[in-house]
Amino acid sequence: MIKVKCPFCGYEMPIKYDKDIAEAKGLFVKCKGRNCKKEFEIKINVK
């Protein structure tokens, strides 16, 4: 299991995925970092 990190501040989000099975695109989340709160897209194994 791998944790998702915010690309802006590096905060480790409380979201985990399996690197062998997971596929995602178009999934937007808001960073839970104290001073960040930016929204970003999660892309996993997109071909």
Image: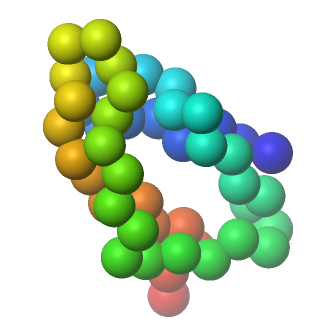
Q: 15 or 1, which is in the foreground?
A: 15
Is residue 23 shown above or below 32? below
Residue lying at the far bottom of the rendered structure: 47
Q: In which quarter of the image is residue 30?
A: top left
> Residue 1's spot in the image, x, y percent?
80, 45
Q: Quadrant of residue 31?
A: top left
Is residue 3 shown above or below 10? below
> Residue 12's spot in the image, x, y percent?
52, 26
**Residue pictured at 79% horizontal, 73% vertical:** 21
Q: 1 or 38, which is in the foreground?
A: 38
> Residue 27's spot in the image, x, y percent?
41, 68
Would you say 31 lies left or right of 11 here?
left
Q: 43 or 47, which is in the foreground?
A: 43
**Residue pictured at 51% horizontal, 32% vertical:** 13
**Residue pictured at 78% horizontal, 58% vertical:** 18
**Residue pictured at 36% horizontal, 76% vertical:** 26
Note whether residue 10 is visible. Answer: no
Is residue 4 shown above or below 10? below
Would you say 15 lies left or right of 38 here?
right
Q: 36 or 5, which is in the foreground?
A: 36
Q: In which quarter of the image is residue 25?
A: bottom left
